[in-house]
Amino acid sequence: MANRPRRLFNMTWVTPLAEEPPVDPPVVLEPVTARYWRLAVNEGGGQGLTISISELTLYDATLTAIPKAGAVVTALANWGGNETPDKAYDGNAGTWWAGRTDGQPSWLQVDHGAPISVGGFGIILRNEANTMPGTVQLQYSHDGVTWLNYSGVLRVRGGSPVPVAGVEYRWGYNQRIWRITLNTTFHLSRSGLQNIEFRSQPGVPEIPSGGRAFATGQWTNSETAEQAFDGRPDTNWGVGAVPSYVGYIFPTKKVVREVMLQARVTDFSHAPSSFVVEYSDDLQQTWVRAGRFGEYPEFTPGEKRLYAVTS
Ligand SMILES: [Ca+2]
């Protein structure tokens, strides 16, 4: 096959972009055994001045919660009063730690007095939108001095209208996270899609469940990342920025063979003119490219296109 034919997707000629240098193989995150663990908050919430966490839970390799009793809990700073660091590690979702009052970054540290094996973590947010963190990152240390990243920087606020208070946001080493990065769009300054599907089998539609959508941001509270994965023809994700990304955290290492993108029915120019499909097996520390596409005619309203990817 000296000359491979161009691929035809939904009556549209699609030209794969030129090859880029190969991507390093994925780092498969495994449970880590260390004594010191901390939740770093790199980006604030609504106000950006302080953040609060109702509860942090560390999980072992089987994703069983590690008992919290006896741990020493500290933080970079705390608001004061009853909102002390231990309140975020007391098993009570109704109490919380509030961090420094002058912005981020901030962190909450737990020390069990001996090494523990951690395979995942979860946070529960306080019912106060202005103090919900924008991003979190789990780190560990063997000596309490030198810190290593267990996860990448995980977005909490942004993929949802407002993160739901009282519901645990959980990440684990056995997840696979898929995303689409819109490098350019036909609108040039806005991004948006009606629907996205990460399909295990070509031609078989899939609506995800059991995970969580996320994005770099959202245009309004009615254009959330979740709405790109609900399969509905009347909801969409959108953000007033390019480049941008939108994706889904699957609870297992899901294989994807085909991606379906549907342009918005109204603002179809917000669909990508070039994008990459990537996945992460190490909580967003590294991304593996599964496909790169672009340079095709502009989407028509509500048009669906299919792309073959490798994972
Ligand atoms: Ca608590």
Image (cartoon, rainbow, N blue to C red):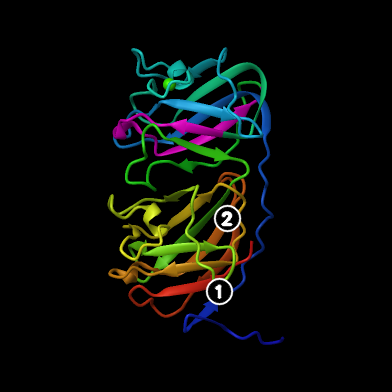
Mark closest to the chain's N terminus, 2 or 1: 1
The residue where tag 1 is placed is: 17
Is 143 on the left or on the right of 83, as rendered?
A: right
Residue 139 vertical placement versus 259 (above, below): above
Going by the numbered disc 2, the residue's amino acid type is Tyr
Residue 163 vertical placement versus 204 (above, below): above
Which residue occupies 36% across, 71% down? 186
Any part of residue 187 in sight:
no
Residue 271: image location, x then y, percent: 38, 68
Residue 202: image location, x then y, percent: 57, 71
Residue 73 vertical placement versus 180 (above, below): above
Q: Quadrant of residue 120?
A: top right
Going by the numbered disc 1, the residue's amino acid type is Leu
Which residue occupies 61% across, 21% down? 144
In the image, is the residue at mark 2 within 8 Å of ligand 1 by its beta carbon? no
Which stretch is magenta? 121-142
Residue 141: image location, x then y, percent: 63, 26
Q: Nearer the viewer, residue 46 or 70?
A: 70
The residue where tag 2 is placed is: 279
Any part of residue 165 in sight:
yes
